[in-house]
Structures are given as structure tokens and as C-alpha cells.
Image: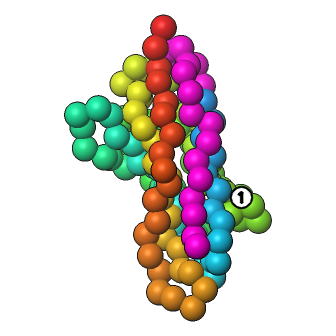
């Protein structure tokens, strides 16, 4: 019933920008933490950025200063603004969130992923 849907990925030139969105829907009692991970071909999935229920943020060292994570509680949506993109940022980006479905304990959910390709 709970679902995370990402959007905003695509092809961008080095130095360009993209804005990813992830909307949560379904029978949701509460959302705690939300974040973004990415996985490049042949690489393991890594944390990119996260934001707590209270608004505290965490960034991977490779993206700090270039990416900004934010959320809209009313829309149950988390965003990732990506600036100064370089080819090393090319990966499938996955949204994840700790969500408590109605009447159940919190569980970590994942979106289907959205492709980000940085190339000239």
C-alpha cells in the first residue's frame, strides 16, 4: 500500500543541474526519515543525502556543497537539488524512507529508482 515514486532524472551536461522528487503515498501513519541513495554500474549502493523528521540533514562528502536535500511535509515529498553535476554523479538514484503504515511498526521503503546521466 505504501509507495515511493521518484521523478526528475534524465540526461544533463557536466556542470548542469537536476531536481529529483520523491512522493510517498498510501496508508501512511507517519514518516520519520527520508533520503537518497545512488548506485553506479558495478558499484554498491551508497548514501547521498538524508533528512530527519526534524529537518537535520546529512550529505556524502562527494556531494556536500553541491546537492541540497529538502522536504515538503504537506505533500509527503522529498527533493534533491543537484548542482554542478559531473560524470561521477551518473547513477540510478533511489529514494528511501522510514514509514509507519497505519497500525504497523516503521519499515524502510525504497522507490523504483530514477536514472541520472551526466555526459557531454
Give the percent coordinates (x, y) of residue 105: 47, 86
Give the residue at mark 1. 72
The 10 Å Cα crowd at callout 1, few under 14, some 14 to 19, many 20 or more, is few
Q: Tell me: 2 left or right of 90.
A: right
Q: Which residue is most to the right?
A: 74
**In the depicted structure, whether residue 28 falls above or below residue 110:** below
Give the percent coordinates (x, y) of residue 99: 53, 74
Which quarter of the picture shows residue 32?
bottom right
Give the percent coordinates (x, y) of residue 21: 63, 46
- Residue 48 in view, yes or no: no
Which one is in front, 65 or 29? 29
What residue is drawn where x is 32% and y is 34%? Answer: 40
Which quarter of the picture shows residue 86?
top left
Q: Tell me: 22 left or right of 65.
A: right
Bounds of the magenta span? Answer: 1-17
**In the depicted structure, whether residue 5 falls above or below residue 67:** below
Give the percent coordinates (x, y) of residue 56: 54, 61
Amino acid at each position: 500500500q505504501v509507495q515511493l515514486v521518484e521523478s526528475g532524472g534524465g540526461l544533463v551536461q557536466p556542470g548542469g543541474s537536476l531536481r529529483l522528487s520523491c512522493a510517498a503515498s498510501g496508508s501512511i501513519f507517519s514518516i520519520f526519515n527520508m533520503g537518497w541513495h545512488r548506485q553506479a554500474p558495478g558499484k554498491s549502493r551508497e548514501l547521498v543525502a538524508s533528512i530527519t523528521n526534524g529537518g537535520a540533514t546529512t550529505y556524502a562528502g562527494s556531494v556536500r556543497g553541491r546537492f541540497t536535500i529538502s522536504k515538503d511535509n504537506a505533500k509527503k515529498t522529498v527533493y534533491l537539488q543537484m548542482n554542478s553535476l559531473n560524470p561521477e554523479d551518473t547513477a540510478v538514484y533511489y529514494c528511501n524512507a522510514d514509514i509507519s503504515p497505519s497500525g504497523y511498526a516503521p519499515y524502510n521503503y525504497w522507490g523504483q529508482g530514477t536514472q541520472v546521466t551526466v555526459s557531454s
